[in-house]
Amino acid sequence: MSKFKYAAALGMVVGIALVTAGCTGGGGSDGEDVAPADSGEVTWWGWTPDTPVAERYIAEFNKDYPDITVTYRNFENVDFRTSITPALDSGEGPDVFNLSPAGGSPDLWGPYALDLAPVAEDVLGADWEDQIGAGWANQLRDSDGRLVSMPLGGMSAGFVWINQDIFDEAGVDVPTDYDSWVAACEQISAAGKTCFTMGAGGADTFPTEMFHSIANSVDPDFFIAAATGDAAWDDPEGVETLQIIKDMREDGIIAANALDGTQYPLANEEFMRGDAAMVQMGFWYTQYSGAESCKAAMEAAGVSNPTCFVQLPAPFPDVAQKGNGSEYFGEADYGLAINADSPNIGAAKTFLSWMTMSQAGQQNVANALDLLPALKGVTPDWDSITLVDQAVQQPAIEQLIEDSVATGQSRQWQTSEETLDAIVLAIQQVLDPTISLSVDEIAAQLQASAVPTSIGIE
């Protein structure tokens, strides 16, 4: 699942990286001169994709390159962060590893990686960057301008997923604004289901996506302006955003158990069990519209002999009711990096190039419905994809892809880790009925703890 979110543990990893960076020979130019190879072995580490998806990618790759053996190792999010740096420092690290734009990752792990711009130019030509999703390559450059990770695909968020079966059974329309959301929740709750499930406990930064969506409804420019220091989190727009979150809890939109756990597993499992009508997840959730993926996800959530429900994306309701709607936001989800100290750089270049820059490799990404393909013009082959309800879900997903590619707002790339953590704490304080702080006081604390960035500001 594409759910890599940075928690407080990242600080420990940053410390490790700063202490050990001088010990690694990574980032050198010798590997850049190594030619791609048609045989060899490649180890690949990542927190995503799920192992079955990675195995499908590798199987298709081996149809073109049968003499390259690729071994994938999937980690939980925190485990990846705590494992990758010491592994790279010890010389026992993977040949290829995931690297995302969020949380300063290009500078954190980029020193271990090759500059991939020459590889991209060799494969796609001098205009290679024009052939990649808008801005995605730039998001995976380090502060020295080196392309330390080649985008595999992009991600969008800022919308919700609905269980259409629950809405049909409750006889209610999908909400479009605050008032209709309150009314829908009353009917859904009366039908014995949770209206909107979310997990805001712990340190995961998923709740920041709800904050971002609400802020976009208040003022579409506010979130990025505050993240980059052109506005303050305790400006009227920030206070209004937090007040809406408080109102959502009091008016029955946000479930009472929201602080009992994190988005994974709490909200994910509640939605996948069919117990909740709505959940806020990003594009990665599209994969569970598939007939087989849906069953697997429901079984993982504890459902025996599941019958899949019709899952659909829907815009985040215009909760500020000012007519702004709520714009999607997105960026490169992650890319593949090559360990500069790898003994298998030739085979790694072949694997990375096929995955990220070939039509065949990118078609696999599109068909998995897990990422937006990095290579422009690649779309899902619907003849090879079976959804739970093709007639209903396919047009909705096609529209989601169109809207996702068009978004101009970043997701986490322009927001510092300190700010993301401060937003999570502010949300938890607003949702906790035992906290006596006013919304204005919570907003002031958020502003005091946030660290603005200048990323992407020209």
Image: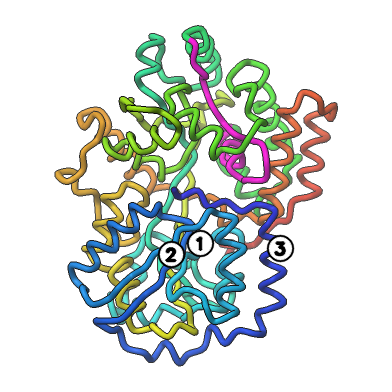
Q: Quadrant of residue 286?
A: top left
Residue 39 appears at what percent x and percent y? 26, 81
Badge 2 vs badge 1, beta-carbon distance below 8 Å: yes
Q: Secondary structure at mark 2?
A: strand
| Comes first in the chain, label 1 or label 3 | 3
Which amino acid, by three-letter code, is at mark 1? Ser
Depth check: give the residue in front, 238 or 158: 158
Q: Is residue 187 above or below residue 100?
A: above
Depth check: give the residue in front, 319 or 161: 161
Q: Residue furthest front?
A: 304
- Give the residue pinned by disc 1: 100
What residue do we see at 66% from left, 31% from top?
260
- Distance from disc 1 to disc 3, alpha carbons, whole Å, reads 18 Å
Q: Quadrant of residue 255?
A: top right
Location of the C terminus (image quadrant): bottom right
- Give the residue pinned by disc 2: 335
- Give the residue pinned by disc 3: 12
- Distance from disc 3 to disc 2, alpha carbons, whole Å, reads 23 Å
What residue do we see at 32% from left, 40% from top?
293
Q: Secondary structure at mark 3?
A: helix
- Distance from disc 2 to disc 1, alpha carbons, whole Å, reads 6 Å
Residue 102 appears at what percent x and percent y? 56, 58
* Range covered by the magenta-colored residues: 192-217
Q: Is residue 315 left or right of residue 434?
A: left
Q: Residue furthest left?
A: 383
Residue 164 appears at what percent x and percent y? 36, 22
- Magenta highlight on residue 279: no
Which amino acid, by three-letter code, is at mark 2? Gly
Mark closer to the observer (3, 2): 3
